[in-house]
Amino acid sequence: TLLVACNDKGYIEDGDVKVPNNAISFSTLDVQASRAVETTTSTLNKDGNSISVTAIQHIDKWSGGEFNTPTTIMNNVKVTYNGGSWSYSPVVYWPETSNEYISFYSYAPFNSEIGNVNKSLSVTDNGSMIFSMTRDGANPINEDVLYAIARNENYANTGNSSVSFVFNHALAKLNFAMRLSSDIETEDVKVNS
């Protein structure tokens, strides 16, 4: 028999297990403008688009150095935009005590439209984000990559609202303009990298 009941403490009680009734959610995302604007807030916030989220729970606010008692509670979790909101599964809940915090790390897009691209994100003990992207095959990777970090979040300081990410562009877009120093007749000009 499964008995589940709500109490006045904001928890769902299931036998001896207390589960917070305050799921972590993610709100509308923002993308910082750059010279390499390919992905914007409006292109990211479209049905079916996904981001990756990794979350590290730690005791006390992180202020540099190593995390105090870190636990990875989300590891490269796919968070998908549909119908005006972001969702993921399984749902993760905020910690019970006020001295427990979560630092969130994210990259976008989760899925690549160019095929055979391997992406990974890891977080070091001192809170640095390491992102890697490689492609199987000879063709270059031509994709805008975004990243975001939201450190020291907890249920009390979010005011029961969603975690907001402000994404930054990880790459730069370069445009070249070339001009010939003299007139030549040609049908085709090819530049190889």
Image: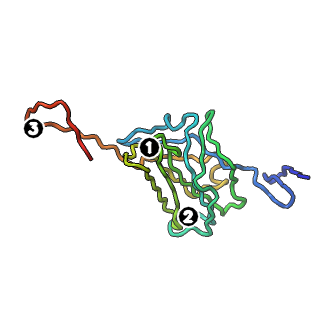
Q: Is residue 9 left or right of residue 126?
A: right
Looking at the rendered image, the disc whose residue lies closer to the viewer, 1 or 3, is: 3
3D distance between C-alphas at marks 3 and 2: 57 Å
Residue bearing mark 3: 181
Count of marks placed on residues: 3
Q: Is residue 87 left or right of residue 52?
A: right
Mark 3, secondary structure of its residue: loop
* Extreme residue in the front direction: 137
Mark before the other along the chain sequence, 2 or 1: 1
* Extreme residue in the right direction: 1
Residue bearing mark 1: 32
Above or below — where is 121 with respect to 69? above
- Category of crowding for the residue at label 1, using alpha-carbon neighbours closer than 10 angstroms: few (below 14), some (14–19), many (at least 20): few
Query: Disc 1 marks which amino acid?
Result: Gln
3D distance between C-alphas at marks 2 and 1: 24 Å
Query: Disc 2 marks which amino acid?
Result: Trp
Q: Quadrant of residue 56?
A: bottom right
Mark 2, secondary structure of its residue: loop
